[in-house]
Image (cartoon, rainbow, N blue to C red):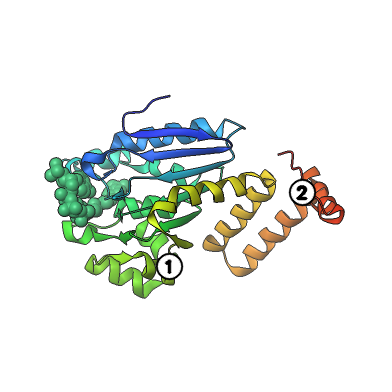
């Protein structure tokens, strides 16, 4: 399948989606959203794909929503079409997602990265929510996800000043899981994705569900969700296999 604004490849069990609008630093227009959603839908239905990497170029993951496109949007049209709402599909993806971020991840680009399960950052990555500079605010979940990830004070400062964070600050703040040298980013992301893809899919899925629940529930509710998820995995063959393999001192052979 070929797309207008993204490149897709499948390497073993890993789907790699590369944002590809080099002339606009991968700015996210409506077509990018449609292409990304289509690719994710396709991979969700493909059992062979067990983990997904979303990445960009070495200069930009994505420099935000496409300001040229935003500039011509009118309120009532945006309201009626729920403009850009489908981006939430990324956060709802049923398979594990890794954002491999090099260069600029600004505005909608930062928001897209935060929709993924976690962010691996190259040492040249820069994150920011500079929408205030163009008279607006993050519209793809940025005020909510950034605040949950880095706390109110830093989220406020970033959104109110438009200041960018470098990779080290983003790691210290908890926005990214790890920093890797720029020329190792893609290999490292692939290795991590392969590692996840090699585990039991239900175990991976329920780990994701529980961690996401931590952002949306009280501690008590989250612990109840975790307990049920934990118990439910005892109904899978993979749990038996994983524990037996440990006792046999061999590699587990997970089926799903
Ligand atoms: N949109 C469109 N084009 C962009 C762009 C963007 N966000 N960012 C860069 N480009 C284009 C530039 O216009 C330029 O195109 P040409 O002039 O060559 O044709 C090309 O990419 C290269 O950019 P620069 O020449 O500016 O490159 P520099 O290295 O000098 O600077 C930069 C890089 C990233 C610092 C700079 O390009 C920049 O500040 N870009 C804008 C960053 C920004 O403000 N991002 C936030 C956008 S607002 C919503 C959902 C979401 C949103 C809104 C609503 N709803 C659900 C309703 C989200 C809003 C945003 O993300």
Residue at 45 percent across and 42 percent down: it is: 89
- Judge left or right: residue 168 versus residue 229: left
Q: Nearer the viewer, residue 119 or 208?
A: 119
Provide the residue designation for mark 1: 171
The answer to which image quadrant residue 156 occupies is: bottom left
Q: Secondary structure at mark 2?
A: loop
Distance of label 2 from label 1 (alpha carbons): 32 Å
Q: Is residue 75 visible?
A: no
Dot 1 alpha-carbon crowd within 10 angstroms: few under 14, some 14 to 19, many 20 or more: some
Q: What mark, if any, has residue 71 been given in the picture?
A: none
Q: Position of residue 235 (x, y in %)?
A: 80, 46
Residue at 41 percent across and 69 percent down: it is: 150
Residue at 44 percent across and 47 percent down: it is: 186
- Judge left or right: residue 8 versus residue 155: right
- Judge left or right: residue 97 versus residue 105: right
Quadrant position of the C terminus in the picture: top right
Q: Position of residue 185 (x, y in %)?
A: 43, 52
Task: Determine whether 238 is above or below 228 in the image.
Answer: above
Provide the residue designation for mark 2: 251
């Amino acid at each position: 399948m070929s797309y207008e604004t993204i490149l897709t490849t499948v390497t073993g069990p890993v789907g790699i989606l590369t944002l590809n609008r080099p002339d606009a630093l991968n700015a996210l227009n409506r077509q990018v959203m449609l292409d990304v959603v289509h690719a994710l839908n396709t991979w969700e239905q493909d059992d062979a794909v067990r983990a997904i990497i979303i990445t960009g170029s070495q200069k930009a993951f994505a420099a935000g929503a496409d300001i040229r496109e935003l500039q011509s949007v009118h309120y009532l049209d945006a309201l009626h079409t729920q403009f850009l709402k489908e981006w939430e599909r990324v956060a709802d993806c049923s398979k594990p997602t890794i954002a491999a971020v090099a260069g600029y991840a600004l505005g909608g680009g930062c928001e897209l990265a935060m929709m993924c399960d976690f962010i691996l950052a190259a040492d040249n990555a820069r994150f920011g929510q500079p929408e205030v500079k163009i008279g607006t605010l993050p519209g793809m979940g940025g005020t909510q996800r950034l605040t949950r990830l880095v706390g109110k004070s830093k989220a406020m400062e970033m959104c109110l000043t438009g200041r960018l964070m470098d990779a080290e600050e983003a790691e210290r703040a908890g926005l990214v899981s790890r920093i890797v040298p720029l020329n190792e980013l893609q290999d490292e992301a692939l290795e991590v994705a392969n590692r996840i893809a090699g585990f039991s899919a239900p175990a991976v899925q329920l780990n994701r569900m529980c961690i996401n629940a931590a952002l949306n529930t009280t501690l008590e509710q989250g612990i109840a969700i975790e307990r049920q998820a934990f118990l439910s995995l005892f109904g899978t063959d993979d749990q038996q296999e994983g524990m037996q393999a440990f006792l046999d001192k061999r590699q587990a052979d997970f089926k799903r």
